Amino acid sequence: MKTDFDLQQNILEKTAEFVKISLEKAESGHDWWHIWRVRNTATHIAKAEQVDPFLVELCALLHDIGDYKFHDGDEELGPKLIREFLESIQTPKSIIEKVDDVVRNISFKGSLNSHVEKSIELQVVQDADRLDAMGAIGIARAFSFSGYIGQSFYDPNIPPKPGLSKEEYKKRKSTSINHFYEKLLLLKDGMNTKAGRALAEERHRFMELYLEQFYKEWDGEG
């Protein structure tokens, strides 16, 4: 007889395979390795915060399926694809509902002007996802995405605009360096968990140091 653990492992294995196939041609900042890192970080935070590791891992695996950024701003595609997949592998409805809540509310733009009450699973996976947008990897991802969409990495004539609304953030044409001020440097203070905040400190400082060096080199002084 299969135990709950066996059933959970079966769901996770099938989900990982589904995600790998779905993201096979994804932009490098939002590919399987991004998912892999977020899953590992989320598992670490879940252990520290004593949160259900199965649900956290499942949400981490699925959090970027049907990302609106790559599907003409469609915010319903991801939840639809995820629900259809989970139903196809006979996932309990209660779990599907919890995953749906996380994937609908995890993104940075989703938190703008939002007062959603966050489940503990959402808090953990959101912290893990945001941590992957910080530090050395976060910097690499920011420039990778800018190149992917044909955006300049820096233009002194385009100032950053922090504090954007959700709709402004979605439509905003900016630069890689502006992205630090419009999102990346804001992430540390938005961490939900104690473990997430601890990890964010070092990554935040690294980004500050990077910007200091960037401006020195831009001005020919570094």
Image: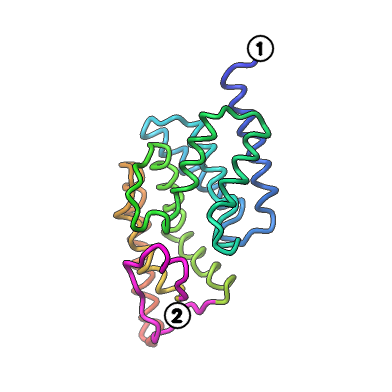
Disc 1 crowd, CA 10 A, few/some/many (<14, 14-19, 20+): few
Which circle marks residue 1 in the picture? 1
Query: What amino acid is at disc 2?
Result: Tyr
Quadrant housing the N terminus:
top right
In the rendering, at what x and y percent does residue 94 appear?
51, 29
Closer to the eye: label 1 or 2:
1
Three-letter amino acid code at the position of disc 1: Met
Residue 208, image quadrant: bottom left
Q: Residue at x 36, y 41 (%)?
A: 118
The percent coordinates of residue 113 (x first, y second) are 33, 57
Label 2's element?
loop
Q: Position of residue 185 (x, y in %)?
A: 34, 63
Return the residue at label 2. Answer: 154
**Do the CB atoms of the residues marked 1 and 2 lie less than 8 Å apart?**
no
In the image, residue 149 sits, relative to residue 206, either above or below, namely below
First in sequence, mark 1 or 2: give its number. Answer: 1
Question: What stretch of residues is rendered in magenta?
Answer: 151-173
State the residue at coordinates (47%, 75%).
173
Q: CA distance from mark 1 to mark 2?
A: 59 Å
Residue 161 forms part of the magenta stretch: yes
